[in-house]
Amino acid sequence: MLRDRIYFLAFIAVLFFGCAKEQTSWDVNSTLPLFKTELSLNNVDNTYLKPNITDSSYLLSYENLIYRYKINDLQATDTGIDAFFSLRKLKLSDRIIENSITLGQINPLFKILNGQQAEIPAQEQSNLTPTDIDASAFFETATLDTGYLDVSIENNLPVNISLIVFELTNATDNTVVASDSFLNIPKDGGLAKKTIDLRGKTVTKTLKGTIKKLITQSSNGLVLIDASKGITVRLGVRNLRPSTAIAAFPSQNVIDQDEGLTLYMGGAEVKWFKVAKGQLRIKVESTIEENMSMVLSLPGAMKNGQPFYQELSMPGSVGKGVSRTEQIYDMTGFLLDFRGKNGPVKDTVNTFHQILKVTLDSSGRKLAVSLKDSIKLTYRIEGLKPEYAIGYLGNSLTRTGSMTTDFGLFKGIDGNVGVKDLNVSFILKNSIGTDGRFKLHKLDGENVFSKNTLGLSANPLMTDLFVTSPMFIRGDFTETKVDLNSNNSNIKAFLENMPQKLNYDLETEISPNGNVNNYQDFVFDDSKLDVIMRVDAPATFSIGGLVLRDTQGLNLSDLGSSDRIKSATLFLEVENSFPVDFGLDVELLDKQYYRLGNLDITPQNGISSGVVDDNGYPLQATKSLLVIKLTRDKAELLKKSGYVAIGMKIKGNGKMQRLFNASKVNVKSRIQFEYEARN
Amino acid sequence: MKLGIKILLFGCFVFSSELFGFGSADNRNHDSVTQNTNLAVKQKSILQPVPSKSTSIYMPVAWLNIESGSNGVPLSMINRFAFGGYISPSEMNDYQQLLSVSRNRMGAIQNYGINIYPIIGIPVAKKLALENITLEIDDITGANFNQDAFRLIFQGNTNYLGQTLNVGNNVVESWRTRTLKFHFRKTFPKWDIIPTVQFGQCLNYTRIETQDIQLKSDAHGDEITFQGNAYSANSGYSFWGNGVGIQAGLVFSIKNIYQNQKNAFGLSFGIKDFGFYNISDVNVISRNAVWNADQSNIIPEGWNHTDPFKLQAVQISSSDLQFGTWFNRQGDSIKSKLNFVETNRRGNVLAPFTLFAKLNITNHTYVSSIKRQEILLKYVNVIGYLPQLSYWAYLKQDFRTIKGNTKFVLNYMLGLSVGGFDDINFNVGFSSNQLKLRNQTLILNAKFTGIEAYFNPSNWHGAGIQFELLYPLYQ
């Protein structure tokens, strides 16, 4: 029984879980057009090949940049101001409150005698009825970090006051704000003053003024009793800076700067700076509920005849939040006077004059503030790059040491070339607005295929070469030219070595004689000193086994399901009207440039030459069909390849050939591939 | 395969059976076991063994049915699609020559399953209304296509440079499903009603349809002109299924609609597997198809009109002449011009269902070697499937070995069918009761349809096999 069930379960398992159907596959053979192109010498940069108008042949004119010197990053270092303002720097208004205590209030008896002549005896009274003093115009409440209360008492009584003790208390809790004694105040307008330090005191809007003690002298005989006159108390507060307050803050400046700001210019001493790129960033963070306004003026920054001037309104915070305002001003196009504040007089360098004023705009509302409240202002000049700068650029000496650069004229070319009527020049092309010096220590040409290196020996290059400053015009340059020929150098042998690399060692010096131009040097953002080798020759060559080589990156990894491509055939239909045959060789290299194999190209004799007349002018193109078969193993190689090295061998007949712009190669291609389809 | 040759083959088989005396009265001495076994089988088997008189109810416990066919594609190619393998370009070229220009059908239905209730060895005391439960897997593929579509899909355009491939309208649909079926039976004196309820998983679903596609390649492959629309919906295979469905079936079986002295006539008819699957996360790639906005359908509502586009060599400048970029640029160009839109959709699709009517003619005279005849009219709702009419003759013959008198009884079948995926097929089969399991006779039925194609699979088309094991689950 058990065995039957095991068999049964095994049968189910095999039936339902073990049945994996093999895939059906077949080959789909498809043909697709790929690309077509026309290659002629017109495609070559006319820097190299210039049409000869007389007979439509070409002149070879080739320049190779050997070295380029630029003044290193003449750029202003980001500079700015960070300002932080706490409540300690905010102040409340100075105010004066006047309050009077009349004779009638001092003693109601005088109300009866009002208007009569009477003799007033000496009196001494204590704790007169307090008088309410309304300070709500100042604040609701304030605990003062600093501040002063000026108390002045004016005696309008007809008798002298010997002593008056005055006390100021908060009505809400009777805490004493101030208390002081005043002695001997003459009658009929006599005045006594005292200043009370309010540091640490808390003052509320409702105050009570109490005359704690009043001693008056007797009158000299009869005097007119005027019950409405009495003692006038004036309370003046000043320099109130609260630590906490609920108050109406007056409008006031929180920052007020008018000074020069110096930038670091990397050693250069700049008088004028035209901004190519850069910005001015202002950021304000405030916890105070009042709005603020800012005025920024850069009198020495001019654009279109106008100085830089900006006004900015910054809203106050809401509740206990933080209000943030950030504004970025593009400085592009501004010409900055770097001579500082009052430049024509002060005439310093790397400094610009800036005026910054930030004002707290009072709304009259009573706001709660404390020492925790703050206003933070950040003001920065960022990424300031010059379109040009004028000043003294500094003396700098640069020696390259042994360096290598490409020489493009013979890039990818191997074989034998005879050159005819060759002119070679060494050119120092300077667009930096200062004098300079150049010296060549070494120049070797290296043929990477033959591994042959030949040094240039040229007497004119053995000594220092001096360059002069161009005109103050963008793009203007001076050219210092040294011609090389067979008489003064080995230049012919140097070039027939067909170097693809140049190894050099040279030095350049800017302002070799210091600030002789008195801050009149200049530099544009594209100013440079180029060291150039120029070759001029008619495009007439004798070519024997010349091979044009190129190595190009190859990435077939993103071809979908490329593993199913079983084979492919690339057809190249070529029409050639050049007077030379071309042989084609395609080598596959891996990502480390190791050779993986060659592609099989038929026919092996490559592309046939066109039919030309006796002068080499093309008459008729010749058609060739090149077939590149990519079998499955080659296709595998293709997928592994990181590069293809294409060698195009030009088979010359040994004669000097002229090249015409009617010569061209037309290439049309299609691909046929076998793709393994699966079901 | 030519119709005349098939008819000739069928005629040869039928007449040869009579010629060699398979139907003579001298061979009516039945082996008792065999006779008893055969008689005990009740009408449940797909292959319909001979009728029974005893109480044992033989039911299929495991089976495999493969039905394939085409009116043009030969058997060898369909076999590769059914069982896998590589088809060489030369074979493919031979195949395409066999097709008609415009109307070709091809398809295959593979069904295999087991009975999971009742289980062998676990006796069931009383037969319930729930007669049995089966677990089945179906692989169904059907296609309507023309010759040029075949050429483009299976060969590519290289062989047809300078020609226009009128691919036109084609459709291919493919299913793989796993179903758990509950078979009920209600027996009445003169007829039975057999309902089925089944729950299915759609393991894989694919539908590809083209509309008015035309591809013209110039003689050198320098220019290709393409027009037309297409879409492909593919759920991908998932063992746990990409969708679920529910289906039902209802079969009426009338045991005896007519009887004469020689034969009794029984009739059954009904519908099977009618229902739907809800399939989700179907990857749909389409060109110019009109879809509803809520992603809830995997068959487009219509097509937009588009103008043909030309694929030509990319004009590049010498500075762009870099190896490796040609492929990508041309590939991007093709993608852009084809403008295929890829989305994920869901939807309900009608499950492949079957309509059938079957007439059983049972000979009860014991004098003829033809014990039973069956005429079956069947339609399966699969693309490429035409209504199929089949005739089967069930025969029985006794043999004696040359040495000794050991008797061997051969039960075999001959048949002819017209329609389905194919046009006409000649069919044979046999039944064996020589296997034993737990002291019970295990009946093996085997049928081979379209056997002419087995002899020449590279040229003739349409074939199928059916195997089933029957066991007396109810006794």
Image (cartoon, coloured by chain):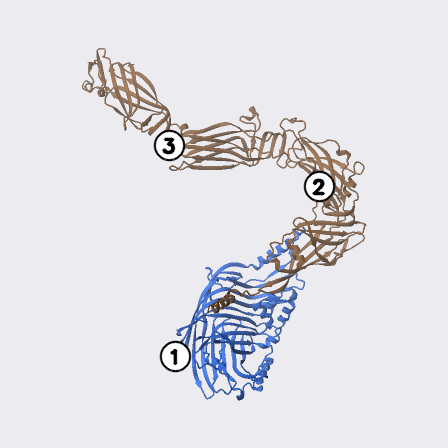
Q: Which residue is mark 2?
A: A64
Chain letter belonging to callout 2: A
Chain to which the residue tagged by mark 1 belongs: B
Decide if residue B55 is on the left or right side of residue A622. left
Q: Is residue A444 visible?
A: yes
Quadrant of the image occupied by residue A194 = top left
Residue B454 location (% of width, % of height): 60, 75
Residue under numbered circle 1: B188
Looking at the picture, which amino acid does disc 3 mark? Val
Name the residue type under label 1.
Phe
In which quadrant of the rendered image does the N terminus of chain B lie? bottom right
In terms of secondary structure, where does tag 2 sit? strand
State the hue of chain B: blue
Same chain, labels 1 and 2? no
| Discs 1, 2 touching: Cβ within 8 Å | no
The residue singled out by tag 3 in the image is A369
Circle count: 3
Looking at the image, residue B231 lies above or below residue A186 = below
Towards the viewer: B449 or A576? B449
Three-letter amino acid code at disc 2? Asn
